[in-house]
Image (spheres, rainbow, N blue to C red):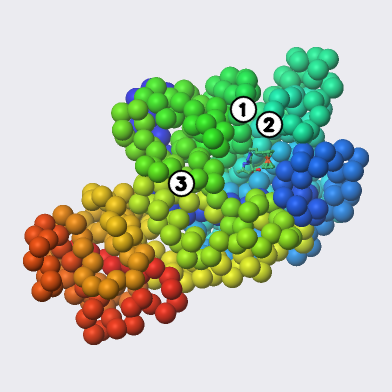
Amino acid sequence: MSGNEIECRKERTKWFLEDRFGMFIHWGLYAIPARGEWVRSVEHISSEDYQVYFDEFNPDRYDAREWARTAKAAGMKYAVLTAKHHDGFCLFDSKLTDYKSTNTQSGRDLVREFVDAFRAEGLKVGLYYSLLDWHHPDYPAFGDLIHPMRANENYRRDPARFEHYLDYMHGQVRELLTNYGKLDIMWFDFSYENLKGEAWRATELMEMIRSIQPHLIIDNRLEASGEEGGSIYTNNPSPYAGDFASPEQIIPPNGVTDAAGNSIPWEACMTLNNNWGYASTDRTYKSAKTVIRKLVECVSKNGNLLLNVGPDAKGEMPRKTLEVLEQVGDWMTQNGDSIYGCGQADFPKPEWGRYTQKGNKLFAHVFEDSVGPVNLVGLADKVRYARLLADGSEVSSTRPWNAKMYPNDAFINFASPEHFSWPLPDERDTVVEVT
Ligand code: H79
């Protein structure tokens, strides 16, 4: 990737860095066994036994407009749906396979309904496409990551057959880019061992992608996985290094920077409970408070959060998912200004929480109950006015009597009578806007 390419990346990712919060949707046949999207691999399910889920697939309560309203109400600005996950099942009407939703009882093109509905709500749309494919006869299911899936016998006999798979994969990406209008993100998943970069014919793939949809942004997994970053992390990214890094189930301690220390667009993807695909017995949901704090953490490090939901086999989001997202949405309605278009602050992380910043506005996310004035370390004489972001009410920023020893700091003081109810009763974190 040339310097010019890096400029193009900046241009392409502008909206992405502004939007900050998206919905990841893992949905497919695996919603029926309801034990997560890796179920076929983990439980060594044969093609014949997995076929029953294809035969029974009929999500008659799928209403993409309902999903889109849910995402929007949660404050999410974009969404990424699994057009195909590792099991190879396609949620779209591909001409290149029979293994697709339009051939099930349901007969619907689920990707079409998704892109139409989310665009109608004003959200940006992305599609996840698995590079792995446990269904395609020419996919080489070898190596540790596919373990415990059995190695593909075809591939063992004739490694050249992998080219057939690559033709198929490239062809499906072309279909998605050609038949579903303007997409905003392609989210490939993932590279491993010797299957990375040119092993996917990645330069050719990128040329095709850029020629059809030049504005589209892609993740870094044509040469990386959730654990390894690829050359986007270096000063000399490859043509398929991607537009953003994609740490999985982890928020990088210091954000993501290239070797020269420049910030690189990144997006942490994270499950809401402990599974990507629907898992009926998984009750380990993160609280709204945790989700909000993790979102704030990402933004405070110049990153995005792609929060996952796993709709059930009927096409509905789990009750608990809706409950948490609604609470996140309540907070976002009042405090979204501290998220959208914001990034890392000019000041180090405060002890009591985090900062986000947009221009000359600093947002103090106070995670701890205060028992006195809250120090804004190093901000003496820099604070013009402070207010609660949620309701606009004034927060005292006059220098308190007990602050003489801290001449370099400014203070916000919640001990004033108008904030006697601190912290706010719903236990969501409170944000103070400081200008
Ligand atoms: O699509 C989601 C995951 O299915 C996929 N990427 C996200 C976005 C992914 N997550 N982790 N991995 C791929 C790497 C594989 C991890 C594994 Fe396992 C460890 C596979 C088998 C053992 C995790 C634990 C999945 C099954 C058991």
- Does mark 1's beta carbon lie closer than 8 Å to ligand 1? yes
Q: Quadrant of the C terminus?
A: bottom left
Element type at marker 2?
A: loop
Tag 3 residue = 251
Element type at marker 3?
A: loop
Q: Residues within 10 Å of mark 2 (few under 14, many from 20)?
A: few
Mark 3 to mark 2 CA distance (whole Å): 23 Å
Q: Is residue 257 above or below residue 384?
A: above
Q: Which residue is at a point 33% across and 78% down the rendered structure image? A: 422
Q: Residues within 10 Å of mark 3 (few under 14, many from 20)?
A: many
- Does mark 2's beta carbon lie closer than 8 Å to ligand 1? yes
The location of residue 297, given as percent across then percent down, is 40, 53
Element type at marker 1?
A: loop
Q: Quadrant of residue 311?
A: bottom right
Q: Are marks 1 and 2 in contact (CB under 8 Å)?
A: yes
Between disc 1 and disc 2, the foreground one is 2
Tag 1 residue = 192
Q: Which residue is at a point 14% across and 60% down the rendered structure image? A: 409
Q: Type of residue at label 2?
A: Leu
- Does mark 3's beta carbon lie closer than 8 Å to ligand 1? no
Front residue of 195 and 179: 195
Front residue of 406 and 265: 406
Q: Quadrant of ligand 1?
A: top right
* Precedes in sequence: disc 3 or disc 2: 2
Tag 2 residue = 145
* Precedes in sequence: disc 1 or disc 3: 1
